[in-house]
Image (spheres, rainbow, N blue to C red):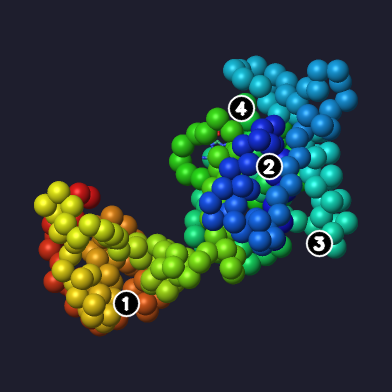
Amino acid sequence: MRFDVVTLFPDMFGTVRDLGITGRAHAQGLWALHTWNPRDYTHDVHRTVDDRPYGGGPGMVMLAAPLEAAVAAAQAARAAQGLAPAPVALLSPAGRRYDQQGAQSLAAGEGIILICGRYEGVDQRFIDRCVTDEISLGDFVLSGGEIAALAVIDAAVRLLPGALNDGDSALQDSFNETLSGLLDSPHYTRPEVHDGQPVPAELLSGHHANIARWRREQSLRLTAARRPELLEKARANGWLTRADEHFLAALGAPDDRNPKS
Ligand SMILES: C[S@@+](CC[C@H](N)C(=O)[O-])C[C@H]1O[C@@H](n2cnc3c(N)ncnc32)[C@H](O)[C@@H]1O
């Protein structure tokens, strides 16, 4: 899988390329990263990548031409590797919200070209001509698309076969279908008692079925308290068992389900 990132700050991508799970996967050759700086596709002495907005107003707008040239260079490099033209996704607050399903479909493909906006955004004509998708990280405004692109890459790469050790399998994570799309259950490690607080007895029982049931119930409880719409989705997909429904019916009012919610 190959990511091409068009960015004015290529150094920011060392974190995902070199560190942690994604760094290990990169070292194993499970994915590749190429960055393309729009400044390298300018023709003036100042290497200008932005200009003032038509119609006035604050801030600057990224020029279409250097972005288009950077995308063309990325597509050409991918073609030279025998890859088909890649989707071109602009990170944008106006985009479709990135979620686990988005990460899964990305991980199943050959990769993507990510465009990191800066300033007030990018010239709309670049979007109209070159961009096939717009991806948002959430309802907040970042200073640039880089942090959003890092999140997009990280969430997809950790799903690649071989990226995770068995011990930290993505199948056990929140939103995964094997967990019925629910939130993950709480985790505990040593010591058995921390400052007077013991680990839940079920986890110390050594009884695998009881431990699995306890984790399932904690997932149900947490999801009911924090993300009831995920429960509805699980129910609609037929992912909840009779035992799940029984447990949910016995839960109190939403406020009682999780004192910290
Ligand atoms: C300061 S923002 C521009 C915000 C834009 N003027 C607006 O109000 O929607 C600069 C760049 O950061 C990126 N960005 C900001 N918030 C984002 C978000 N929630 N998700 C993805 N990218 C975001 C986009 O690439 C955007 O072009």
Please name the residue that numbered disc 1 is placed on.
240
What amino acid type should be assigned to the residue bearing mark 1? Leu
Q: Is residue 174 above or below residue 22?
A: below
Q: Nearer the viewer, residue 50 or 28?
A: 28
- Determine which of the numbered discs, if any, sits on residue 94 in the image: none
- The spot of residue 174 in percent (x, y) is 40, 62
User: Are the residues tagged 1 and 3 within 8 Å (C-beta)?
Assistant: no
- The spot of residue 26 in percent (x, y) is 65, 55
Q: Secondary structure at mark 1?
A: loop
Please tell me which of labels 3 and 4 falls first in the chain: 3
User: Are the residues tagged 2 and 4 within 8 Å (C-beta)?
Assistant: no
Q: Residue at x 26, y 58 (%)?
A: 190
Q: Residue at x 68, y 36 (%)?
A: 10
What amino acid type should be assigned to the residue bearing mark 3? Leu
Q: Secondary structure at mark 3?
A: loop
Q: Is residue 46 above or below residue 36?
A: above
Please tell me which of labels 1 and 2 falls first in the chain: 2
Please tell me which of labels 4 and 1 falls first in the chain: 4
Residue 70 falls in image quadrant: top right
Residue 200 falls in image quadrant: bottom left
Q: CA distance from mark 3 to mark 2?
A: 19 Å
Local packing at callout 2 (Cα closer than 10 Å; few below 14, some 14-19, many 20+) is many
What amino acid type should be assigned to the residue bearing mark 4? Glu
Please name the residue that numbered disc 3 is placed on.
83
Please tell me which of labels 1 and 3 falls first in the chain: 3
Please name the residue that numbered disc 4 is placed on.
120
User: Are the residues tagged 1 and 2 within 8 Å (C-beta)?
Assistant: no
- Residue 228 visible here: no
Q: Secondary structure at mark 2?
A: strand
